[in-house]
Amino acid sequence: GLARVDAGKGHPVRLVVAGTARFERDAIRSARTRAVGAMGVAIALVVSLGTLVLREQRREHEASARLADERREHERDEELGRTNRLASLAALSLGIGHELSTPLGVILGRVEQLSADPGTDAGKKKALLAIEEQVVRIRSVLQGFLSLARGDAPTMTRMRASVVVKSSIALVEHRFHAAKVKLETDLDEAAHIACDASLLAQVVINLLVNATVAAPPGTCVRVRVKVRGRDVVLEVTDEGEGISDESARRATEPFFTTRAHEGGSGLGLSIAREIVSHHGGTLVVRARDAEGRDPSRRGTVALVTLPLVELGKDAQ
């Protein structure tokens, strides 16, 4: 503080404290006010930032919810379209089956009549027997398709997957010779499945024919059957141009085809998928080099996965 002595009167005077206590109180009050103000500003900033963050999070959540709703709606539309196409396919199959059953019956009847004719020589009887076998096979396949179209479960028999593959190869092997395409097989005889052999053979035949069409002359188509865990995997691989991701994703859709100019109907793989599905399995088509790591590995792979079963006494 400041002190002053009045010497003129010759005696001590009181020390005058010039507002020290008041000054200190004012300083403390001012500091407290500034601290409270700064704290208020800080709180206001935190609240504002928190509000902005919450608002942004709410916007992101609403955007994510909208995208999820749009995705679900798109998936529902796709599923509805797929269901409608399958319903159309089922109706078409029933109609075709009904129309074909009559002429097939007539052909079979005429073959039997000619085979029973005493004037038919051995060579003609052999040819008629081959025709009869193929007609019976067509009728069996057709009845299987009609059963699937009606929603009936296929008749299952436990057997080696290699049996179905070998019988299918025998029916289309001439296509490989004509196309100058080599066919290699690697069939695990321990791969046992439960299947309707005539229906599953149509799946294998379809995959083999597709591979033959896609494979350039001089290349190879490989057919493998192997056990993978609790599954049996049938793999058909060609060395053609390959398949795009979009085409691979839509390959099993009814009426989708990349060979419309070649007369492709877009029904082969969709029917194959339905048959495999009725057998409790899956059918996937993808590029041979799906990861894009090796451009030299061109081609397409079709994978059929079926449940592995124990081989029983009734197995073939």
Image: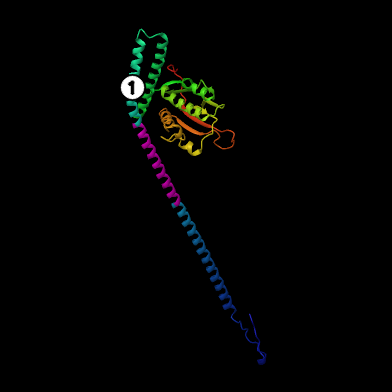
Visible in this render: residue 131? yes
Q: Is residue 120 left or right of residue 291?
A: left
Closer-to-camera residue (15/140) = 140
2 to 212, vertically: above or below:
below
Region in magenta: 63-91
Instruction: Tell me how the rendering is colored.
Output: rainbow
Q: In which quarter of the image is the N terminus?
A: bottom right
Mark 1 lies on a secondary structure that is helix
185 to 4, vertically: above or below:
above
Q: Any magenta on residue 239?
A: no
Q: Is residue 5 left or right of residue 224?
A: right
Q: Any magenta on residue 82?
A: yes
Measured from the top left, where is residue 302 in percent x and y? 49, 30
Visible in this render: residue 161? no
Which residue appears farthest toward the front when viewing the image? Answer: 119
Measured from the top left, where is residue 132 in percent x and y? 38, 16
Closer-to-camera residue (27/138) = 138
User: Which amino acid does the dot numbered 1 rest on?
Assistant: Pro
Q: In which quarter of the image is the C terminus?
A: top left
- Give the residue at x 43% y 21%: 158
Q: In this view, does 41 lie to the left or right of 263?
A: right
- Give the residue at x 53% y 71%: 33
- Give the residue at x 55% y 73%: 30
Q: Main secondary structure of the magenta part?
A: helix
Quadrant assignment, res 113: top left
Measured from the top left, where is residue 111 in percent x and y? 36, 15
Residue matched to label 1: 103
